[in-house]
Amino acid sequence: MFINRQWLGLQSLRLSAFFLIALVLCPCAPAEGSFVNVTDEAEIGYLQWTAPAGWVKHVPEVMTGGAAVADFDNDGWVDLLVTRYQSTDTLFRNLGDGTFESVSELAGIEVVAPSNGAAWGDIDNDGDADLYISVAGESGDPLRNLLYVNHGDGTFSEEGRLWGADLEVPNWHSGFSVAFGDYNLDGRLDIHTCQWAVTGPGNRSVLLKNTGLSGGFFDVTAGAGVEMWDDPEAAEGPEFTTQAFTSRLTDLDLDGWPDLVVAGDFGTSRLFWNNGDGTFVDGTELAQIGGDENGMGLAVGDYDGDGLPDLFFTSIYDGRQPAIPNSGWGVTGNRLYRNLGNRVFEDATDDAGVRDGGWGWGAVFFDYDNDGDLDLAMTNGFETDRMETETPFHTDPTKLWRNDGGTFTDVSTSVGITDTEKGKGLLVFDYDRDGDLDLFIVNNEGSPILYRNDTVNDNHWLRVKPRGRYSNRDGIGAVVTIFQGDNAPAQHREISGGSHFLTQSEKIAHFGLGDSAEPVARVRVRWPSGIEQEILNVAPNQELEVIEPGSPYEAWLAEHFSDGERAAGVVTDQLADPDGDGLNNALEFGAGLDPRNADGIGPIGIFRGADSGERLVRYRHRRLPRGVRALIEKSTNLEDWQPCDAVDLEAISVEKTSDWGVEIITSRLVPEANYLRMRVVIEP
């Protein structure tokens, strides 16, 4: 830890000693393409579920079917995990030659359970991917979620109970999607789980905080303000229970803190804004979302290229007239919510042309043709042994909509997407490392389909793979932005640990570059820690790994000083003052100043307000989730210092700057104090 100080004299508005500052007034063409079913060729055929003889198929088993991808053995090739209901889940290792091999037994993936949703996340930041799986069934041994911890040698051990993430119940679970994300930005991945049919406190949707301590995860759902179970015996709580299918921790208002969005059945979808203090507030109604009648799948992405992440919820569309009686579900179809900023969305479903997707489940935004905008795919289809009114949904075709400038065109058949089975989960990944995204579909009670993307055009691509050091190692929550130059619009991608519906795609930022073969002018990564990095003149058609600096201070040094200067350490020490302005590096870092230029800008100043005698304090500070604190302290004698609180400094305005994490705050100074100083604390 290092503490640095600058102080301001308030006594008689005149210059004092000890470096006291006097307080005086002062576009690309669309491309058709071809997806080829290579399931058999890739050797990943399996049956997701086989109903026992005489079994009456009903929920939840007819809604199951998960998968997730990650390079679990760190050999550079993305592997595939599929959940198999009431069977051993299968881990397919990517051999790098277009084929996979099952390594479940060798890896220790061996528990037989009613497995459902799946996601990979490095929960212990040790450099390898761990696996979390939800369960959905009326009985089983065990009837608990599974957490497979990666030992780094290709093997796992199931440690759900040990880590406090098992959520074990005696007789009923309807667990669906699971999502990783660092909601409190402490550098450790937390987990959100979705529960569809909630019967009590043991099987509701929960937010699990990763403490990094013995016991691992703790249920913080109620305290964090994201309780979605209407407990009939509780005096306070939500007015209804969310029958949650899919969730995502994602920064929708671009304030740096992951928000929580949930797709819920029977009109119960929710959006919780992150307050930045470990709590959330329900903003569903004010955000003008939640009109989806049966939210099931969820896709998040900036489909219109305005820099704001948009939301797509899958639901049920039935255009039959007259309407056919059903069991209470809605029939008005999907919802696409366009982000307008300021925590408000508008319904753009019909303008975009994506309402009719049949009985929808999983959905994903991805740039299948590498033309620089996000296209949209979704799975669909439903069947039980109980309701004849579901018959039209048995053979719903999978949808692929091409983005044509903010509206979508159904190109499914023309590009070779012909699946008409009971699709549930889907995901995208570049399994053959050829620079385009392939599509994997899980069919309930059937075989999967791996569609290899063989789109032929002249478009180029760039893939950016963040590796966190101060943030979580997976870089989940990092936002990658590219600027191609030549007036091309910026593209934004967030690294997601969330779900589309029971599934998780590759954790990488994939960008189509259109027909430009020129280097990408700038690649910017905004890490969950608040650190920002820029890489200039990046060649296309490559996978670029970006490694986060080990601390915010280290990132700041890299921004301002050369490799040689940092190696010498003469001008980069926290006490150094390279520009000779009397402010050392630690203070200039905390205030967001340039250590190489004495430009006369101080971190703190005071001026008179409109009212006689009113004093306004204006100061700069770097606001990061952790790593630096810039405090304003008061004194009457330069010896006894006390921190100013919200009463002392009544905030008037907060102005963001172009520097990462730096704000300029104007406050009304209330206390009778002779001196103010800024104290900067840099945490290790």
Image: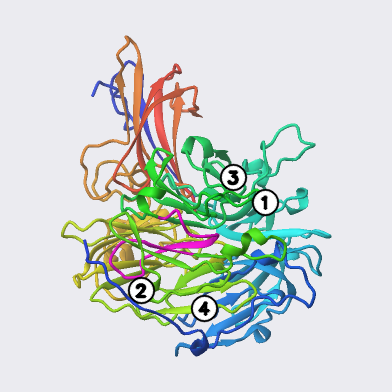
Is residue 85 something that shows in the picture? yes
Magenta span includes 355: yes
Q: Which residue is mark 1?
A: 327
Q: CA distance from mark 4 to mark 2?
A: 17 Å
Q: Which residue is mark 4?
A: 449
Is residue 502 something that shows in the picture? no
Task: Looking at the image, tell me whether mark 1 or mark 4 is earlier in sequence order.
Answer: 1
Q: Nearer the viewer, residue 340 or 668?
A: 340
Please give the label number shown on residue 267.
Answer: 3
Task: Looking at the image, tell me whether mark 4 or mark 2 is earlier in sequence order.
Answer: 2
Task: Looking at the image, tell me whether mark 3 or mark 1 is earlier in sequence order.
Answer: 3
Q: Residues within 10 Å of mark 4 (few under 14, many from 20)?
A: many
Q: Which x, y percent locates residue 70?
A: 52, 73
Task: Looking at the image, tell me whether mark 2 or mark 3 is earlier in sequence order.
Answer: 3
Element marked by disc 2: helix
- Which mark is in front, 3 or 1? 1
Q: Which residue is mark 2?
A: 414
Q: What amino acid type is highlighted by mark number 3?
A: Gly
Q: Which x, y percent locates residue 205?
A: 67, 51
* Magenta residue span: 354-378
Q: Residues within 10 Å of mark 3 (few under 14, many from 20)?
A: some
Q: CB under 8 Å between callouts 3 and 4?
A: no
- Which mark is in front, 2 or 3? 2
Q: Residues within 10 Å of mark 2 (few under 14, many from 20)?
A: few
